[in-house]
Amino acid sequence: MHACPPDATPYPAGEDAPMRSIFDQTLLLLSRSLDFRAKRNALLASNVANLETPGYKAKDLVFEEALGDALRAEQPGPLEVTNPRHFDGRQTLPLALVKPQVILTSNPVGNLDENSVDLEKEMAKLGENQVVYQAYTQMVAHKFAELRMSIREGEF
Amino acid sequence: MDLLSAMSTASSGMSAQRFRMNIIAANIANAQTTRTPEGGPYRRRDVIFGALPPQRTFEEELRAQADPYEPLHAKVLGVAIDQRPPVLRYDPSHPDANEDGYVAMPNINPMEEVVNMMLASRSYEANVAAFNATKNMALKALEIGRA
């Protein structure tokens, strides 16, 4: 086996991390999603707090697409690889390295004081974010329940 | 932790709105005040809001440098005195009337104050809602490890 270059991937190619089979991609994806949802919640809270601050621009966090791309990053890229050091032509970051992107929320009905916060929109986003966060926490909990069940040989 | 920082962001919004509410209450209370320490009638006051990064420790500051996204706290930067001239009201019996019988009264429009009060109270509620949303998320996350 060739020595892998010290890249930031948690599981270097060609090397089987022992925990990989238990704590699979799903759990990593869920934990990253939870992280981003929490960050997004902080940004949305800041939008609501600055509802009447002149010149404040509403911000939002986008990450779903980057996470989706990262899921496909495990698949082989378009270029053939005969050596682990080869570049396979993939442009995507692995899941553990995906960064969310901060965007400015557009508000076509601008306020006179250059503030772009739309309270209704922000509250809707807060609610949506909260629900999806709770859904993810339940998925993580179920994941651990599955593990617990198999450790106890089927007894719950 | 992002959830805790979101809670402090929401509370910054709440305290900014509460401060504004105090100022509005002072405006309404002094709608008829003709004598003030600085002389002349009471002048309407207004708060100035600003979006500032939260106060951080050195370690948090270092971490924030690496983190491009930044939730901003709502802060009261100062209190501005309304520069509109006082309203002259004809009331010769008033002790502060000038020789023509006019009294300089504070330029306070109760409607304006009430509208601002409603805005402040709605904004406060919105921040409470944001706070509760964050709190529910944090509580839900605590349930993950529970059997």
Image (cartoon, helix red, strand yellow):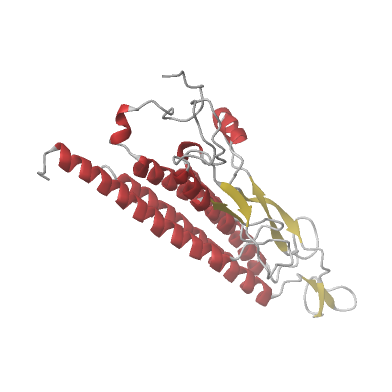
Residue found at x 54% / y 62%: A122
Horizontal side of residue B48 vs A3, given as left or right: right
Q: Position of residue A107 (x, y in %)?
A: 66, 65
Quadrant location, the C terminus of chain A: top left
Q: Nearer the viewer, residue A20 or A88?
A: A88
Could you tell me which residue is drawn at 60 percent across and 49 percent down? A102
Q: How many marks?
A: 0
Q: Is residue A94 above or below residue A137?
A: above
Q: Position of residue B122 (x, y in %)?
A: 54, 67
Residue at x-position 58% and y-position 38%: B67
The residue closer to the viewer here, A108 or A85, is A85
Could you tell whether B89 is left or right of A92 in the image? right
Q: Quadrant of residue A109?
A: bottom right
- Residue B7 visible in this rendered orientation of the protein: no
Provide residue A21's location: percent of width, then percent of height: 29, 35
**Residue A85 visible in the displayed image:** yes
Dividing the image into 4 quarters, which one contains the N terminus of chain A? top left
Say above or below: B83 vs A155.
Answer: below
